[in-house]
Amino acid sequence: MLAGLRPVVDLDVFWHLRTGERLWSEPGWLPVDTLGTLSAGNPWAYKDIAADVALYGWASAFGVGGLPWLVALLAAAMCALLARPPATATLRPPPATTTSEIALALGVGALALGAIQHRMQPRPLLFALLLFTAALPMLEAARADAGERRALRLRVWLGPIACVALAGVCHRGVVLIAAVVGVQLLGVAVALSLPTPAVRAGAWLRSVGLPVVAIGLLLALSTVANPNGTATITTAVALVGGEAFRRHVTEWQPMPLGELLRHHGVGLLPLLLAGLGLRVVAAGDLGRSGQSGGGAGWRSLLPDLALAAGLWLLVFDAARWLPYAAFASARVAFLSDPLRSFAPRRRLPASLALASVATLYLSLERPGEIAAGIAPDRFPAAVVAEARALGLGEGLCNAYDHGGWLLWWQWPALRPSVDGRADMVYTPDDFDVALAAEHDALAFERLDARMRQRGGVGCQWVLSRQLATGRTHAYLEADAAFRLVAWSEQAVVFARRAATPAVDRAAFSALTGTPLDAVAYRVGQQAGADAGRWALAQTELDRMAATSPDSVQVAIARVTLALGAGREAERDAALQALVARHPEHPATLQLLQRLTGVASRP
């Protein structure tokens, strides 16, 4: 359940909630977009229909803050599916799962979850991952049944096909699941036909004909019977090869080996544990099931091992495949069962349970802040409220990352210019211009012109994403037509001076650049003998602290402002306040290192 003790930080969760709400309340299947500005009226070919409605239903019943518990429930279900024994379809009932097997499933499941904690957010991906994990034991049983009967029975393959059908209305991961099921079905059919002496062409076609029909059924269930139609497959294929999307979205970019091992290497551990199963070969158990402490024979594991290895190769091309690779590895590790050769049975459950808890805890993004609900320091509610108080409304151009939040918490009063429905409702050119505008002034001019052409007022104000090292749309700091009117750790607001009369009155004039600590130091140098400028800088820091009360950036800026002004008493007081509030923050320790040469609390 530790997977649920992590607040909602994902920036795309909220547009999924809004999509689910509109699917539930509007007739039809949302054929065109009615939510955004740049995308208004564009065809909406693909939606994660069932998953988005399920997310919205859960949030309606338990609140948005209860979504992490849905994540915990799905994670527990995945670990339970890992514990399914490698039974054949002819064994009824399947062998009972032992305590050691449950502990082993929890252990390898925890390793898999630890590798993908960055993806353990309430998103449709989790539903596809659940169905992928459910299909693996079904495929093992179907392969074993074909081996025992020396024939294919379509009835045995209906379970994996049903997983494909369900995944088709949940997530575009259905294409991967359908490919896995189809390839294994075709491979079994071909393997059954090859040993026959002097196989006639007709006999071989009859052997392969059944999987061809089943694969056709898979495609039909994923398209014709899907309210999205063929868009489930066509958009998924376009997404994999989409150059513009890969350029802007990190999860579709290649993952270097060093980054993979540093951040997600724990997911490889199940595969390495499975490698220990080579001892099965040394012991002469090759091909015999159930001879290594309840595990599967090595030959029967080859399809699962090949699948896991192939998915890890895909991870190097795009991190998007990481969750599937991690759980495929965990399933292989559970089946090969090598751990029982290295630990007494009576100690195995307790040791693996402890390993599970430790792995999940250490893999959390913020181990010291385990809590369900929504991370309040992630979203720009405070600066949007300030902008609304200034009369800003129509003509919003936002950073990509804030679009989903706007769709759930501010729609229809505010409509985002771009959001995470990148390839669903935006043309590639519009999407490219919207994201390029975050860093390129010329692209911003094109974005402004496009919004005017589509009946809007252009970009009257900009919700920029704020980072410790910089912000999007930073070029607007030097644009005389715009002013910085609201600041928080999550975002800042730039407003066109002509938008409302209140813009000039509310604008920041001293602390406008990044990084904030360096800007404050320079302002402090200028304000050393200027009481008015010192007071102005303090007032602006107070405004920043009002929107982000726990901001470490503001606390450090108070120190560097006093340092630049040569005011030792104010510097020492600000430094003591910083250390008292953020004693272990990396930025605090870095500042202490710069000031005293010692990176620790005084």
Image (cartoon, helix red, strand yellow):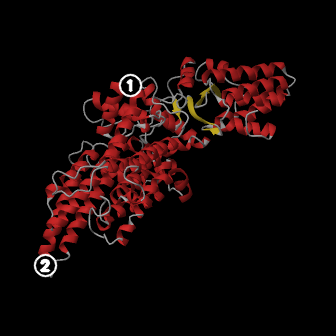
Q: Is residue 480 above or below residue 388?
A: below
Image disc number at residue 63: 1
Q: Which is more toward the observer, 46 or 504?
A: 46
Q: Is residue 495 left or right of residue 277?
A: right
Dot 2 falls on a residue whose secondary structure is: loop
Residue 385: percent from the left, percent from the top?
A: 54, 21
Decide: few, some or many residues near mark 2? Use Cα within 10 Å; few <14, some 14-19, many ≥20.
few
Image vertical order of residue 114 relative to residue 549, above or below: below
Contact? badges 1 and 2 (CB < 8 Å): no
The kind of residue tagged 1 is Gly
Where residue 422 appears, as percent x and y from the top left, is 43, 43
The single residue placed furthest to the bottom in the displayed view is: 198
Residue at 46 percent of width and 47 percent of height: 355
Residue marked by disc 2: 200
Q: Residue at x 70, y 35 (%)?
A: 588
User: Eyeballing the image, is 306 above or below 404?
Assistant: below
**Camera sees residue 223:** no
Q: Amino acid at mark 2?
A: Arg
How far from the left and from the top, in percent, is residue 89? Answer: 18, 56
Helix, strand, or loop for circle 1?
loop
Q: Residues within 10 Å of mark 1 (few under 14, many from 20)?
A: few
Q: Position of residue 439 (x, y in %)?
A: 60, 42
User: Which corner quadrant holds the N terminus?
Assistant: top left
Q: Using the rendered view, name the quadrant where residue 482 is placed.
A: top right
* 521, 372: nearer the viewer: 372
